[in-house]
Image: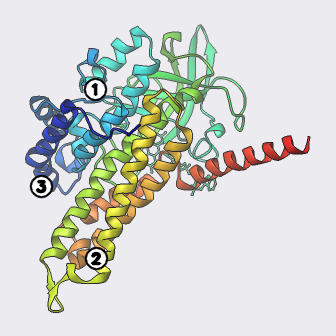
Amino acid sequence: MPIDLDYSPEVSTLVDRTREFIREVVLPIEDEHGGDITAAGSDTMRTRLQEAAREAGVFAPHAPLEFGGLGLGMSDRAPVFEAAGYSLFGPLALNIAAPDEGNVHLLAEVASPEQKSRFLEPLATGAVRSAFAMTEPAPGAGSDPSALRTRAERREGQWSITGHKWFITGADGADFFIVMARTSGEPGERGGATMFLVPADSPGLRVGRHISTLDRSMVGGHCEVDFDDVRVPDSAVLGAVDQGFAYAQVRLGPARMTHVMRWLGAARRGHDIAVAHVARREGFGGRLGDLGMIQQMVADNEIDIAATRALLVRACWELDRGETAGDSTSIAKTFAAEAIFRIVDRSVQMCGGLGVSDDLPLARLSREVRPFRVYDGPSEVHRWALAKRRIGAAKRALAEVSD
Ligand SMILES: Cc1cc2nc3c(=O)[nH]c(=O)nc-3n(C[C@H](O)[C@H](O)[C@H](O)COP(=O)(O)OP(=O)(O)OC[C@H]3O[C@@H](n4cnc5c(N)ncnc54)[C@H](O)[C@@H]3O)c2cc1C
């Protein structure tokens, strides 16, 4: 049976409309502010861009229909998110930027009806922002989530959360946090985590330092957040107690793929700029694009773009079938994070001095895409997990043969 890679007419129209909206409305604003969302006005700019996206009919393509979204599955999100990612401010405009987009997905899957109306609805409509608080300073949770130290304990009929998180994207100005806290076991043990929905104005919750990082396009920064005896009721538990690591997988697989979609759009913009540059720039009796080593960089970019898209298609297909897609999302995330960095880096190189200047957007694109090799699981962790699963299976097969 042939595989159908066509998108429906509705999705194709949405992709075209998103491309036009990004080109006409969003790119000029990003360029005016050098891709720095703080300089552009943070939440004021977010509201303005989101109003424009609503008017253009491209707002919230991922959110459930009942909450005003367009209800797209993972496979259909891919070309739309890529089109939005062509501008660093595009995902924010469509309300599909991290971490809100991943949080919408998680809440749609796991939240109770009451939690959906209190937290999911305002998030999906862009009325509020949110944050996802998992990572902690050493010796707490990072690449190894089982090191989780933030604790939630029963006190006077409520949960009391105490701990210190950092690198929490969007924390400054978030309306609520999805907090991963340990409800049983000890740091180093695999289970025992619970997710809590914590309003930002809860007594004892304090957003601290903005950690200065390479990137500049995410509203609300990457912050340290303290939880000091923050009290929440039972109704704040997202899903079931002690199941937090399982729900993290519900969020992380799709969230990794939507990061790939968005950053692929950014990489494609870098590539388009470089190709236009080498087709025009004269040198050595012709154009730079006539030189073999330049052609190799153009071809290698094309290969990295095509391969990233192909891996995305596979992973999204598995996710849409309800599979956990552990291997395929790890493979796609690792390849894409490295390929996207290579594409942008080659694009910088092809544009020479201009490439590293702020006259073109390439320098800021390379700052934005570099951290993707660290968050959503560093490349080494995905390689380690993939290899561990393969070698584990081989060992089990050997043991069966020798039994
Ligand atoms: C821009 C940005 C935004 C972020 N946003 C959020 C957020 O919103 N919420 C949140 O909770 N967290 C967030 N994070 C944190 C991010 O998830 C962590 O940085 C990531 O999980 C890695 O953890 P760590 O920084 O503690 O690195 P460590 O765990 O200390 O790892 C350091 C390095 O060691 C290597 N390494 C680790 N494990 C292995 C292994 N098994 N095999 C081989 N090598 C290994 C890798 O190279 C890794 O990069 C963000 C980070 C960044 C940079």
Local secondary structure at mark 3? helix
Q: Nearer the viewer, mark 3 or mark 2?
A: 2
Is 221 situated left or right of 133 in this image?
left
Instruction: Look at label 3 and name its amino acid.
Output: Glu
Is 102 situated left or right of 396 in this image?
left
Quadrant (top left, top right, bottom left, bottom right) of the N terminus: top left
Q: Which residue ends up furthest to the right in the rendered image?
A: 403
Instruction: Look at label 2 and name its amino acid.
Output: Gln
Is residue 202 at least partly visible in the picture? Answer: no
- The answer for how far apart the CA atoms under marks 3 and 1 are is 25 Å
Residue 151 quadrant: top right
Reading the image, the residue beneath label 2 is 295
Reading the image, the residue beneath label 1 is 128
Q: Position of residue 54 (x, y in %)?
A: 14, 29
Residue 293 quadrant: bottom left
Please rate how many residues cluster around mark 2, counting C-alpha atoms within 10 Å: few if below 14, some from 14 to 19, many from 20.
some
Instruction: Look at label 1 and name its amino acid.
Output: Val
Discs 3, 1 touching: Cβ within 8 Å: no
